[in-house]
Amino acid sequence: MAIPKEVFSKLFSPLTPQEQKELDANKPSKRKETKEQGKVSYQEAKDILGEDFLGPEATEKTWGFQSEAIPIPFTREELIRAKELNQFLTLRVDRLKDASGSYVSFTMQNADRIAGPNFQTAKKGKILLSVGDQWKLDSNFFTTETPSVQWALVSRDVIPNSTNKNHLQQTEALIDYLKNQVFQGQPIPPEYQEAIDAFEAQKPTILALMKTDWKTAALALENLIINQMTRQTPVEALQDTTVYFDNTGKRLLETNYTWTSRRSSVGYLVNFGSAGAKGASLGRWRPDDADDDLGVVLSRHA
């Protein structure tokens, strides 16, 4: 299928770091006015979510870094619904403390290198199963990408009906879950509707590319706004699962995997999971692949 150059450039060119920052910065603004009315305190969030509230104290316990107080951007009603859907609220951070007491960037590589030995000393197992594979060392998601400092609502397991699906079909499952579960009985917020509309417009082209040029299809799926809004990056998945285990004693994604929103250096879409005591695993799949233990975790921030 021939794609006009200008269409290809618009839909499938990777976002620059500045464009990604602007995208992240602009997401909350669309909901700011409505959120101001429904702000909840940390204590209210704890009362609603119990152990599924992982705030500054939790991140400090695990990573040695406590961020400044950041208002929770979700309403009381959203947190109650999140509890019903087995989601947890976590404050992601972009730094961790090393052995010298200095703060370093929170990358997957640094998290395993710095916190990994502490976990093993405390008999909590390993953080990552393997870190020396060249494909990981060659990939930005592993060596340089850090989470944004933000609150996120994350499902404790892959969402229903998301296994045995390719990456595009999983994206459709995420959209269905948003419409019929997360925002059940209410209008879809405008920023999500815009992202869904963009997905529907691009879907025919992506479907065609999955048959003829899987690497370009993977790039298009990575760049979809709806995937960036609802899927974890690999480093977010590592941080979320590790903080949850360290503070609750319960392991997430112990027997399955979530397909993330990032590609490896050679174009495969990265999955994260099997996060048992031997350490979590990372894998890489073509966008048209599917497996019965490969689903998708819902992750959203406002």
Image (cartoon, rainbow, N blue to C red):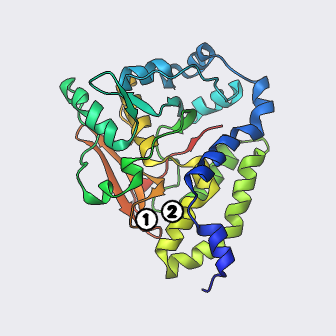
Image quadrant containing the C terminus: top right
In the rendered image, is residue 169 in sight? Answer: no
* Vertical arrangement, residue 145 with respect to residue 198, above or below: above
Q: Amino acid at mark 1?
A: Ala
Residue beneath disc 2: 167
What residue appears at the point 71 percent right and 49 percent down from the top-left corner? Answer: 192
Q: Position of residue 57 (x, y in %)?
A: 46, 17
* Whether residue 74 can be seen here: yes
Is tag 1's residue or tag 2's residue first in the polypeptide sequence? 2
Q: Which residue is mark 1?
A: 290
Amino acid under disc 2: His
x, y percent for residue 285: 39, 64
Label 1: state its secondary structure. loop
In the picture, measured across the screen, residue 56 lies left or right of residue 98, that is right
Splitting the image into 4 quarters, where does residue 64 fall? Answer: top left
Judged by depth in the image, the label closer to the viewer, 1 or 2, is 2
Residue depicted at x 49% and y 40%: 147
The picture places residue 241, in percent across and down from the top left corner, at 40, 36
Tell me: residue 4, above or below residue 202: below
Q: Quadrant of residue 146?
A: top left
Q: Secondary structure at mark 2?
A: helix
